[in-house]
Amino acid sequence: MYQHNTKVVIDLGSGTISTGYGMDDEPTSDINKSLTGQSRRIYSKIKSNSLLPDLKYPIDKGIITQLDDLELMLEHLILEEMKIIEMKEYPILIGYNSLNNVKRTRVGITEIVFEKLGVPVFALADRNMLSLLASGRTTGLVLKSGDCITNSVTIDEGQVLTQHCCGVEFGGRDLSLFLEKLIENCGYKIGEEFDSSTGVEHLIQIKQRLCQISMDYHWETQRFDICDRYYEIGENGISLGLDQYKSSIHELILKSLQHLDSKFKEECQKNIILSGGNTLFPNFTERLKRELNLTPCRVVAPPERKYSSWIGGSILSSIQGVDSMWILR
């Protein structure tokens, strides 16, 4: 095995690409699909230095669709944001969605890493497995809900059991679009109430600050007056009452569990791990437990679950004795 103390960890999410060093607690830099905050600056800089006429976010619904754009973004994040000059001295671990990407995509990633970046050794790992590893487990069920997709994935001793995985093309971006419609129904328009160039950013902030999962929707629709919440910027504002509650994915978990043998099924029920930014809504964990109605049932919601797959990659990159996963150039 190629020995090196410092490894680079990259997480390829549908909404965010995160990079950082192995054994760190969180990534050092990232770029998100919404181009909010720092991502707008990074994206503009990449595009200005690019020969590509139309730079696009390279991942759509878990599928890597633009390898050329992915190469440019990785190169910038590593060389410019992480300030790494010689990639030939740094092994790379990349987390990706193995459920959605075919062999030629994996080959394409390998070519980028070896031929374009000049990396000496690298490894590919499933993002769901990495999320489970971040919780200190190698067996269990991961419910991962991110920007565009939501998956229920069963994992046995680090191996993803694809035949028992269930997913839907629905995530945080869809909720944002739905929220925008609800806000418009209230008489507001994001592009008119706020500067249109930052409309998406405000929409995301409204979702993150005000929205929550309802524990009893029918009761709360009768009591929305005591739950009225307000979002403001400058002289403008939006008031949300009923709309903050509208919006169940527990059936994905039940389908994944349906055909498991009794022993493994019980193990998964006791180790349901939440991952992804779309699981951060208040009351998400409590509502999920109630809807599942399973015995036994333990739902683990790590506070850092927005970056669980990257954190799992950081952990895996530092584990000794897993030489078989590393590919030498």
Image (cartoon, rainbow, N blue to C red):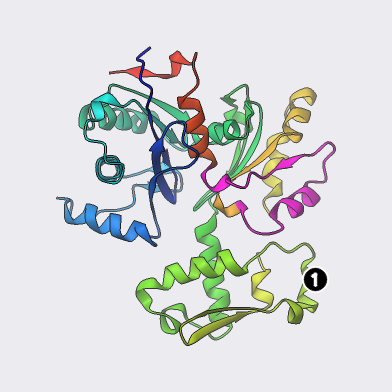
Question: At 31% from the left edge and 42% from the top edge, which residue is drawn?
Answer: 82
Whether residue 284 is in magenta: the answer is yes
Residue 80 in the image, given as x and y percentages of width and height: 25, 45
Residue 126 in the image, given as x and y percentages of width and height: 49, 32
Q: Write the start and end of the magenta stretch as one range.
A: 279-307
Residue 99 in the image, given as x and y percentages of width and height: 50, 35
Q: Nearer the viewer, residue 323 or 267?
A: 323
Numbered disc 1: secondary structure: helix
Task: Tell me the crowding category of disc 1: few under 14, some 14 to 19, or many 20 or more residues within 10 angstroms, Cα based.
Answer: few
Q: Nearer the viewer, residue 112 or 93?
A: 93
In the rendered image of this protein, does residue 6 appear above or below residue 225? above
Residue 74 in the image, given as x and y percentages of width and height: 30, 41
Quarter of the image for residue 9 reads top left
Whether residue 108 is in magenta: the answer is no
Quarter of the image for residue 246 reads bottom right
Question: At 50% from the left edge and 26% from the top edge, which residue is drawn?
Answer: 316
Question: At 40% from the left edge and 19% from the top edge, which residue is drawn?
Answer: 326
View extreme (left): residue: 51
In the rendered image of this protein, does residue 137 appear above or below residue 272? above
Which residue position is annotated with label 1?
A: 218
Amino acid under disc 1: His
Image quarter of the N terminus: top left
Q: Nearer the viewer, residue 294 or 167?
A: 294
